[in-house]
Image (tube, rainbow, N blue to C red):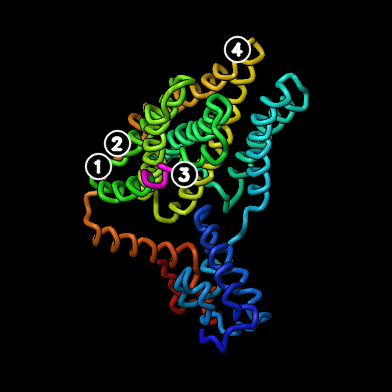
Amino acid sequence: MHFDERPSCFRNIAHEILYVSVISCAQLLTQAALGNVLVPLHIIGPSIGIEDVTKLPWTLAAYSLTVELSSAVHPTGKTDIPGAILGLSGLALFIYCWNEGPVTGWNKPYVYVLLIVSILVIGLFIVVEMKTKEPIMPLTIWSVKGFPGVLVSMALGWSSFGIFIYYIVQFLQVIRGASALLTTAMMSPVTISGLVATISVSQIYGRLPAHFLLMGAMVFFCLSNTLIATAPAHQTYWAQVFVSTLVAPFAMDVSFPAASLIVSNTMPINQQGVAASMVNTVINWSISLGLGIAGTVESELLKRGKTVLEGYRGGLYVGIGLSGIGVIVALLFCRVSSPHTSIGEKERQDFGTASAVVSDTIINTNMVKGEGLEGEFPMIWRF
């Protein structure tokens, strides 16, 4: 969009730089930032002077090259509102109890009562999904070979990561007396290690079986927790803490691509989106759950007269155990056969399957004929 054609709110260069910075930070936190930005723009665009949705300000064009926005691909689809409410409520209550228990004590009635309620709500959610025509979580997804193992393994590994990232900071600041600024400097090697891990995984991605990659990620999760759990109170930073900051990024950057590879190889194309969403949900949910379990162990140790360091190590031992189980799960229950087709053949097969799914299940051409949906669908290109 030419400068003169931009709305007045986008003609201030300082505002545009700030806008791009905010969006970039959001992208670091979640891939959903793209949809969260483009959808409101499509709705409120006319009110800020953007009548043609194909003409986006450079602030958004720099973020994503969008050719066009159009109507929903599934215009007659239904949203599983009861399932979404029950699922979110059950998971939120369950996590709340596990993080409230270590703080206030599990002997408080409201803590364990809410825990029981959360389990009942999750059970009700499963019942609702069984009877819903278009469930938010199709139960048939659990019958796909390898997928349950992937979710369990990712939950175990990332729950141990939540424990690691919390207790390494506590260890440095409380036990070794490091300031917040010095702690930040001590954690800074993760930036370099993360870059190396990302480049490395891009080279081995597809060359090794996915379950071996996932198992390796679980080993890295376990090793990072072990290094901090066994670190003496008075030791040089370079011996174990530094090494742990080099190891932890490999666990994160290897686990997610490995899980994505298993999902793409095993899931039907019409369920891959749901499966990927469940993987993301499990990652974020398990980080909090693992920390709640470790916090419970730490609080119980402190009640028994153990030192603060022993309490921290107790929590870290939980992380070691969780990631250790994750290694076994990845090795035994995530093994799937690799596709023997070439990339080109896979793309052609996926395109054919997608076309069949769209024509047979998503869009009834007889029903929507004349509504303008039988034309080409827009494409979204990402940097």
Name the dominant secondary structure of the magenta segment. helix
- Lower position in the chain sequence, tag 1 or tag 3: 3
Which mark is in front, 2 or 3? 2
Badge 2 is on which residue? Answer: 212
Q: Residues within 10 Å of mark 2 (few under 14, many from 20)?
A: some
Badge 1 is on which residue? Answer: 208
Q: Of 34 and 25, which appears nearest the observer?
A: 25
Q: Residues within 10 Å of mark 4 (few under 14, many from 20)?
A: some
- Lower position in the chain sequence, tag 4 or tag 3: 3
Give the secondary structure at mark 4. loop
Give the secondary structure at mark 3. helix
Residue found at x 53% / y 75%: 70
| C-alpha gap between disc 2 and disc 4 | 39 Å
Which mark is in front, 2 or 4? 4
Q: Residues within 10 Å of mark 1 (few under 14, many from 20)?
A: few
Tell me whether circle 2 and circle 4 mark residues in contact (CB < 8 Å): no
Looking at the picture, which amino acid does disc 3 mark? Ile
Residue found at x 43% / y 20%: 230
Q: Position of residue 39 (x, y in %)?
A: 59, 68
Q: Which residues are magenta?
A: 188-193
Q: Position of residue 218 (x, y in %)?
A: 38, 32
